[in-house]
Amino acid sequence: MSFTVLIVDDEENARKNLSVFLRSKNFEVFEAGTLAEARQQLKIGNGDIVLLDVQLPDGYGQTLLKELQQQPNRPPVILITGFGDIEMAVDAMRNGAHDFLTKPINDIKVVENSVARACEIIQMRREIEHYRQKQLDSVDFVLGSNEKMKNVVAQALKASRAMVSVLITGETGTGKEILARFIHKSGPRAAKQFVAINCAAIQPTLLESELFGHEPEGFTDAKTRKHGLMEIADDGILFLDEISSMPLEMQAKLLRAIEEKAFRRVGGNDLVKVDVQILAASNRNLKELIKENAFREDLYYRLKVVDLDLPPLRERKNDIPEFVGFFIKELNPRLGLNVIDMTPVAMEILKKYSWPGNIRELRNTIERAMLFCDGEKIDVADLPLDLVEKLA
């Protein structure tokens, strides 16, 4: 693995001596005598590691240090100065310096060791980025070019590795369950259960039994023991869709189960211990529901260790062609068709529409259009008439 080193020092001899030594260690070395030259080198990508003098003709080295800390892929910075003291060293480390060396450097081994430690940091970052990119390459949904969506997926990857609770918000049809399944697939629990429950689709009186199970005679008509979904999801992931529909009394019981990692079945006395990662989703504003005393604030903060808000499709219109291609490829085998594309005119109509039903509505539209398509390309006549008329 190769690394580049940028030496920033106004003393030419000092630069040359360090350059000769580092090149002998197979580093690619670049030099700068001022802050301005250093910024230019960094701008074009020269400098995985920066050896930075403090006193420079056009400013103070720590100014560049602070600038670099704002960059996402900030290089390790090793400050080198003839004016070093403890106070300056402490200040440098607080501002993100990797190491602090003083002139004159009598033992070149000190530089070698410091640069070697910086290389270890860079190598670790590259391995993490490689893993992240590998995960993104295997995404089975449309990532697209929307920056907000890219950030959501990047945070989802971190949440999957940390196995923390995640709250996924967004309008109906934006793909909350798809994102939840991506978190499951990307994390250490990928081989374990992914159990999903739609809290809005179950009667409030039955929800406790669905989640926690029940014992025989736990309630009327309960003849046998039933294992709840939280118990079934042990060691895996429990996805609570439309969590906003959960009654307050049930919210309290869920909160206690999450915090204690244990619960009692309905009608039972024994604690059932579980290790479950909780993912929850809502298309309603939970903060507003908290103000209305319709959702527990403590449960809200317990669920949103990581908060992922999916953008609506109207904010991702540049991604619509990619969505169309994705759905055509997905639906062709199931429908027994061989549709290959969409005409530019039909695509423009899709881009102009507001998509209140978001990605789900787009997918249904493409499925319907493919069924009515007689050729290889979906055309305007294949699109739903009401959609075309709205934009006429």
Image: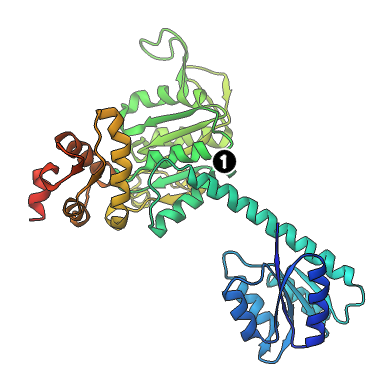
Q: Is residue 116 above or below residue 155?
A: below
Q: Residue at x 25, y 45 (%)?
A: 341
Rate crowding at label 1 as few (under 14), some (14 to 19) or many (20 or more) other CA atoms within 10 Å.
many
Residue 289 rendering spot, x and y as whole percentages: 34, 48
- Give the farthest residue toward the right: 106
Q: Position of residue 292 (x, y in %)?
A: 32, 49
Is 173 on the left-hand or right-hand side of 24? left
Is residue 165 toward the left or the right of residue 97 in the image?
Answer: left
Which residue is drawn at the image coordinates 36% and 35% (left, top)?
246
Where does residue 250 sit, x and y in percent of width and height? Answer: 41, 32
Identify residue for label 1.
163
What count of labels does the image hold? 1
Which of the image's four quarters has the C terminus? bottom left
325 or 364: nearer the viewer: 325
The kind of secondary structure element at disc 1 is loop
Residue 316 drawn at (x, y percent): 31, 55
